[in-house]
Amino acid sequence: MKKKTKSNVWHIQWMLLAFVALCFTGCKDDNEDQGEAFDPNKPIVISDFSPKKGGVGNNLILYGDNFGNDISRVKVTIGGKDARIITVKNKSMYCIIPPKAYNGDIQVSALDDNGQVISSAEAESTFEYEKKWMVSTAFGTHYENSNEFFDMKDGPLDAGGGFGNVFWFSWDPLSDYNKLYFTNDGKTTRYLDLEKNEIGTFSHGFDRVTAMTWTLDGDLILSHNHSSDTRTANYLYTRESNYSTRETLGGYARGVNGTMVHPINGEFYYSRYRAGDMWKYDFETGESSLCFQNPYSGVAIYLVPHPSGNYAYMLEQEFYFIMRTDYDWISKTFTTPYAICGTGNAWGYSDGIGTHAQLNRPIQGVFVKNPDYAGQDDEYDFYFCDKNNHCVRILTPTGRVTTFAGRGNNGTSGLFDGEVRTEARFNEPRALTFDPKRNCFYVGDGLNKIIRKIAKETE
């Protein structure tokens, strides 16, 4: 036992000595590498770089020779834009891809004490720059001090002011995506004229309107979200009268939060809060009929039909999930819904498939065609505002939920522009729409009281 113990001690001592020697050698090699300063008598060489393609914020490693070892004395440009250098070790350099580096040429320059270029080299091949989705402020002014806030007045969009409570977006279907209406959960409905760069107001006299939609002929439907069991809620404003006359659609309805028009057959559908059900109004017969009873009552149900008319999504805010209702083309009505993602009455935040995904008060969504799905039965992704998770998310036709924009910099809520996932933040986004003419999304950023834009760089 005595000999064995002594032998073990010597083994440990030799291992420690070997470890120290290895560390010393490693440190020495590191110091030697970093100690090679730029040599003005030698050319700068760029032999390779990795990866070969990427976008703003991605990492890029350059390989070569005579880069030097002083970050303040070397400059890297990609596509003519300055890249932020993280480390330089003479034969390798680590930097961050800058925004809008479109043409992808890579140049390394050595600088003198005054920041002037004394030597440079350009890579033989170019970097493939991939344009990323970016978040910016489209309309309105954000006020840090809420006491300074005021609603934007009718007139030019750049005149100042914000948006008190953007709730639901809806394009005038005959405006060629130039006129965007929105409810603000208050006494007025407003619209943005993107062609004239103006904002206007549509006065209806109701104390609360959250839902709006359009008939196939381009007439406007507004719903008065009231709490009476003996009052009508849905009204049609005709385009022919310049929306000055209105007619009632259906009978008494209380707590109408969601409405939609079937994109092919043109029937009008609406949900009711207290009863938790969905109704159909047929323009041909002038009659209303119950489609189905929702699994939950006392829930705001927002309705978004698929462009094909084959189904619609029901975003159930208070119960934190999205249901799907399929359309029966024979009986011409929507049928009993079933859960497609999230778990009823259980909020949270996680990406995943079906009930493994967690939501927190989903509100408005929009179907957007995905070119990767060309030829498939369903070619659309569904983008939606997940209000209390402060983000915009994507629901695929297979039921997978991912986060598209927001919660950047490892945060949750706030007001930050930039790349959709790594930088951007929202604060209770509610309204969402897609503009195919300009290839961008507009987001009603609730507590920031502005309208944000999500678009590819330069768009």
Image: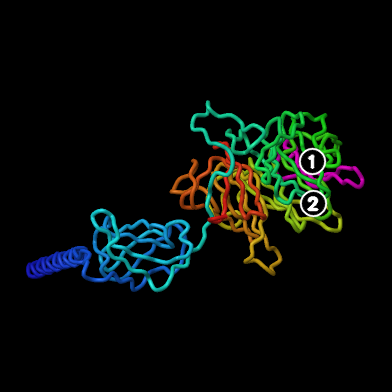
Q: Is the C terminus in the top left, top right, bottom left or bottom right quadrant?
A: bottom right
Mark 1 or 2, closer to the camera:
1
Indicate the secondary structure of the residue bearing disc 2: loop
Q: Residue 330 lies in what quarter of the image?
A: bottom right
Q: Amino acid at mark 2?
A: His
Q: Residue furthest right?
A: 285
- Residue density around tag 1, few if under 14, some if 14–19, many if 20 or more, within 10 Å: many
Indicate the secondary structure of the residue bearing disc 1: strand
Q: Amino acid at mark 1?
A: Ile
Q: Which mark is residue 221?
A: 1
Percent coordinates x, y for residue 232 in the rendering? 82, 33
Q: Nearer the viewer, residue 312 or 157?
A: 157
Q: As drawn, is 108 to the left or to the right of 292?
A: left
Q: As drawn, is 47 to the left or to the right of 320?
A: left
Q: As drawn, is 122 to the left or to the right of 138?
A: left
Q: Is residue 291 magenta?
A: yes
Q: As drawn, is 201 to the left or to the right of 441?
A: right
Residues drawn in magenta: 269-298
Q: From the viewer's perspective, is residue 152 above or below residue 350?
A: above
Percent coordinates x, y for residue 448 in the rendering? 54, 37
Q: From the viewer's perspective, is residue 182 above or below residue 328?
A: above
Q: Residue 401 lies in what quarter of the image?
A: bottom right
Q: Which mark is residue 420?
A: none
Q: Nearer the viewer, residue 121 or 316?
A: 121
Percent coordinates x, y for residue 9 in the rendering? 10, 66
Residue 353 visible in this rendered orientation of the protein: yes
Name the residue that disc number 2 marks.
Answer: 262
Residue 298 visible in this rendered orientation of the protein: no
Q: Is residue 416 magenta?
A: no
User: Does the CB distance between marks 1 and 2 fall below 8 Å?
Assistant: no
Q: Earlier in the sequence, mark 1 or mark 2?
A: 1
